[in-house]
Every structure is written in C-alpha cells, then in structure tokens.
Amino acid sequence: MKRFACLFLLIVFACSFAQAQEFDAGISFGLTPSQVDGDAMTGYNKIGFNAGAFVKLDQGNIWVYQMDIAYTTKGSRQASSKNMDYSRPEILTSYVDFVLSAGYKITDKITLKAGLTPSVLITQKEQTTGGGDAGRAENPFRPFNLLAMGGLNYSLGEHWSFNLAYNYSILSIRKGGYEFEDYDVKVENAQYHNYITLNLYYQF
C-alpha cells in the first residue's frame, strides 16, 4: 500500500510541477503485451497494464521532451495450447517506470520517440501454469532495471493521443551464471524484459 501511495504522490508532484513551469501534463493508461527473453518461452502472451502521468515540453515545431511515470505490470506466460507444459514457470512482475524520451515531429499528428526507462521493481512472482509457486530464491530479480524505448505518438485531437512503443531491457532483470563452452563465455539464465505498450494519453 505504501508503494502505491508513493506512486500517487509522484504523479501529483509531476502534474503540479508541470503546471508551475507551464509544461503540458496529463495522464496515461493502456495495455502491455509482454514476454521475457531467456525463459524458454516465446510470444507476447502475457497481457499486463500500465497507468500513470506525464509532463512534456514542446521545443518549437519539431522537438518534444517528455517524462512519464507509470505503474506497469509485465512478465511472461505460455501460449494456450493442447501441449502446454504445466510445470513451466510464468513470470509476473510490476514496476514503476520512469520513461525519459525525446520526440521528433514528422507531421502535425505523428511524433517519433526514443528514450531510456529506469525501472524500479515493486512486486515479483513466479508460478506454474497450474497455479503453483515456482519461485527461485537462488536467482532473484534485480531491484532496478534499465530499458531502451522506441515508438510513436499519434494525435487524436486537442486532448487525446495514442502511443505505441517497444521496450527492451538493456540490463538483465535477474542474475545469470557464467559458463564456458567451446572457448565462449555464455550467460546462463539471464533474462530480459521485452514488451510493447499501447497507451491512450489525455493532456489536461
């Protein structure tokens, strides 16, 4: 509960700061199709959600600088099929993401964006498809992550816009063991978030 209270205070602070500095501000919400590279499963089968707030600064008619603060759920799961392995662990995590981006306006409605996302782990869980606990205490999740982000924003009018972004971990989300194989050094069990965000933005 304290973590959600801190997130709420951060959102209120961001919106208040934006108004004081004559920045634009607003809220965002949407879906997060996700997977985890390195967990022996493929496909954006885990559908999470995200919600938060943003502040942005328009520089002339070309550049847009923006910071988002969002609570995001992400992880991985198997695709539903007759051949599901019910013992295989699924990953369920939640983070507070701080998305720092720069955007380039290619038209009045379309802005291309790129940036970095420092991310703070809030909750973590691993469970089998059958619902059993599959936590691996010997290989815990890191408390912080850093992701690269690229995407676009499409204006739907004066207040609304649609945002599509691809996100990938620069740093692994959990530690992996180093192994030597055929004179090559490989990282075993290292995992990386790999997800898409589909958001609606509302600007005050």
Image: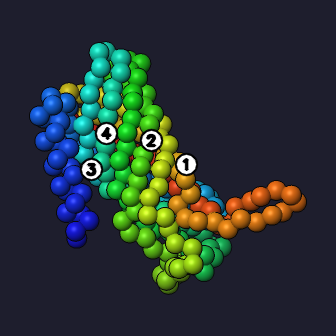
Q: Label 2: how many residues lie within 10 Å, few (<14), some (14-19) or many (20+)?
A: many
Q: CA distance from mark 4 to mark 2?
A: 10 Å
Q: Where 86 falls versus 4 (above or below)? A: below
The amino acid beneath tag 2 is Leu
Q: Front-most of 164 and 120? A: 120
Q: Which residue is mark 3?
A: 52
The amino acid beneath tag 3 is Gly
Q: Which mark is residue 55?
A: none
Q: Which residue is mark 2?
A: 116
First in sequence, mark 1 or 2: give its number. 2
Q: Is residue 168 visible?
A: yes
CB of mark 1 within 8 Å of CB of mark 3?
no
Q: Position of residue 175 (x, y in %)?
A: 58, 65
- What element does badge 1 sit on? loop
Q: Label 1: how many residues lie within 10 Å, few (<14), some (14-19) or many (20+)?
A: some
First in sequence, mark 3 or 4: give its number. 3
- What element does badge 2 sit on? strand
The tally of labels here is 4
Q: Front-most of 49 and 93? A: 93
Q: Which mark is residue 67?
A: 4
Left or right: 10, with 44 as reference point: left
Between circles 1 and 3, the one closer to the viewer is: 1
Left or right: 12, with 105 as reference point: left
Q: CA distance from mark 4 to mark 1?
A: 19 Å
- What element does badge 4 sit on? strand
Q: CA distance from mark 1 to mark 2?
A: 9 Å
The amino acid beneath tag 4 is Met
First in sequence, mark 3 or 2: give its number. 3
Q: Where 30 falls versus 108 (above or below)? A: below
**Residue in the picture at 43% in, 28% down:** 112
Q: Which residue is mark 1?
A: 170
